[in-house]
Image: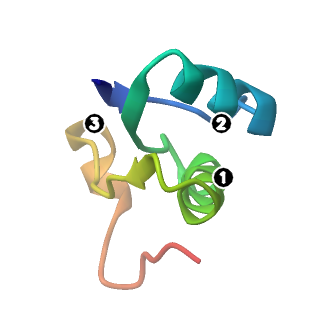
């Protein structure tokens, strides 16, 4: 059993996820870089039990966040 603790899976399709799982990748922790890519990562995590989403704000972008910032 293998895991990937930091991956950006926005370009992966269902076939790619299945190939990763068949190769022994049991857990993939993904995240986005911005609101759009985080929404893609969230959809993937909802569809595939092997994918989990990590939500955080990268320090480089912390000045862009405030109490009105939210992900849909």
Q: Residue furthest left?
A: 59
Q: Residue at x 40, y 54 (%)?
A: 53
Q: Is residue 36 above or below residue 31?
A: below
Instruction: Give residue 5's quadrant in the image.
Output: top left
Identify the secondary structure beneath mark 1: helix
Q: Residue at x 66, y 52 (%)?
A: 40
Q: Residues within 10 Å of mark 2 (few under 14, many from 20)?
A: some
Quarter of the image with the N terminus is: top left
Q: Which residue is mark 2?
A: 10
Q: Give how far across and how far down residue 58 sits, in percent.
A: 27, 42
Identify the secondary structure beneath mark 3: helix
Question: How has the structure been colored for display?
Answer: rainbow
Q: Which residue is mark 3?
A: 60
- Of 14 and 62, the residue lying toward us: 14
Q: Give how far across and how far down residue 2 sits, in percent.
A: 30, 22
- Pointer 1 and pointer 2: residues touching (CB < 8 Å)? yes
């Amino acid at each position: 059993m293998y895991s990937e603790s930091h991956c950006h899976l926005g370009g992966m399709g269902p076939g790619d996820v299945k190939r990763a799982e068949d190769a022994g990748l049991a857990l993939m922790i993904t995240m986005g870089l911005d609101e759009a890519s985080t929404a893609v990562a969230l959809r993937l995590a909802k569809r595939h039990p092997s994918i989990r989403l990590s939500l955080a704000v990268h320090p480089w972008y912390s000045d862009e966040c405030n109490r009105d910032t939210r992900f849909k």
